[in-house]
């Protein structure tokens, strides 16, 4: 089973088209500091929809653990913030760091797999 933190998908995002015509970060968005990422995601739940239409709920706990719930799968592991990146490690896919941006209260996450940028809507 693939970790959906690595494979999460997109709502339509403003800005120039990314790799392969996929959504990109909003124009002018800059990489947030690690402490800003941590403060923004800690103890919060987000909903994201992949470009294939599947939606998932992402929970980032303040203790550095996460879980992702999709209709057909549930993944879990640990997370940490680096400058401009959210890094995760799970038992299925191992470790990965993905670029992120925070713009007007919305969390944007670029998938390493294909460059697609997804929008995490806070719940």
Image: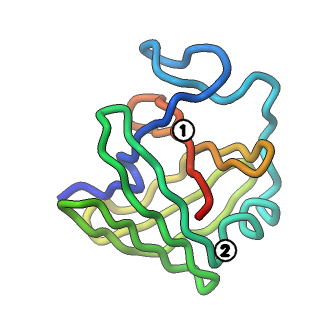
In the rendered image, residue 86, in percent from the top left (x then y), is placed at 60, 56
Foreground residue among 52 and 35: 52
Residue at 22% over, 64% down: 73
Residue at 65% over, 49% down: 107
Residue 110 image-quadrant placement = top right
- Please state if 73 lies on the left or on the right of 95 as rendered: left
Name the quadrant of the C terminus. Answer: bottom right
Secondary structure of the residue carrying tag 2 is loop
Q: What is the number of the mark on residue 24?
A: none
Name the quadrant of the N terminus. Answer: bottom left
Q: Going by the picture, which residue comes out furthest to the front?
A: 123
In the rendered image, residue 81, in percent from the top left (x then y), is placed at 67, 63
Q: Is residue 70 above or below residue 29?
A: below
Q: Is residue 18 above or below residue 107?
A: above
Foreground residue among 21 and 54: 54
- Please state if 74 lies on the left or on the right of 81 as rendered: left
In the rendered image, residue 91, in percent from the top left (x then y), is placed at 29, 71
Residue 14 image-quadrant placement = top right
Q: Is residue 72 above or below residue 113?
A: below
Secondary structure of the residue carrying tag 1 is strand
Give the CA distance from mark 2 to mark 1: 19 Å
Q: Is residue 41 above or below residue 86?
A: below
In the rendered image, residue 96, in percent from the top left (x then y), is placed at 46, 54
Q: What is the number of the mark on residue 42?
A: 2
Of callouts 2 and 1, the N-terminal one: 2
- Please state if 93 lies on the left or on the right of 79 as rendered: left
Task: Write down the residue under mark 1.
Answer: 110
Residue at 81% over, 66% down: 35
Residue 119 image-quadrant placement = top right
Q: Residues within 10 Å of mark 2 (few under 14, many from 20)?
A: some
Foreground residue among 105 and 64: 105
- Please state if 68 lies on the left or on the right of 123 as rendered: left
């Amino acid at each position: 089973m693939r970790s959906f933190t690595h494979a999460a998908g997109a709502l339509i995002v403003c800005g120039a088209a990314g790799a392969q015509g996929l959504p990109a970060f909003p124009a002018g968005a800059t990489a947030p500091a690690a402490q800003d990422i941590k403060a923004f995601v800690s103890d919060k739940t987000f909903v994201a929809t992949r470009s294939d239409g599947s939606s998932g709920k992402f929970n980032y706990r303040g203790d550095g653990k996460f879980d992702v719930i999709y209709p057909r799968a549930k993944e879990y592991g640990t997370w940490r913030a680096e400058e401009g990146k959210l890094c995760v490690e799970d038992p299925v896919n191992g470790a990965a760091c993905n670029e992120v941006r925070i713009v007007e209260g919305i969390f944007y996450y670029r998938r390493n797999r294909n460059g697609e940028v997804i929008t995490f809507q806070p719940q």
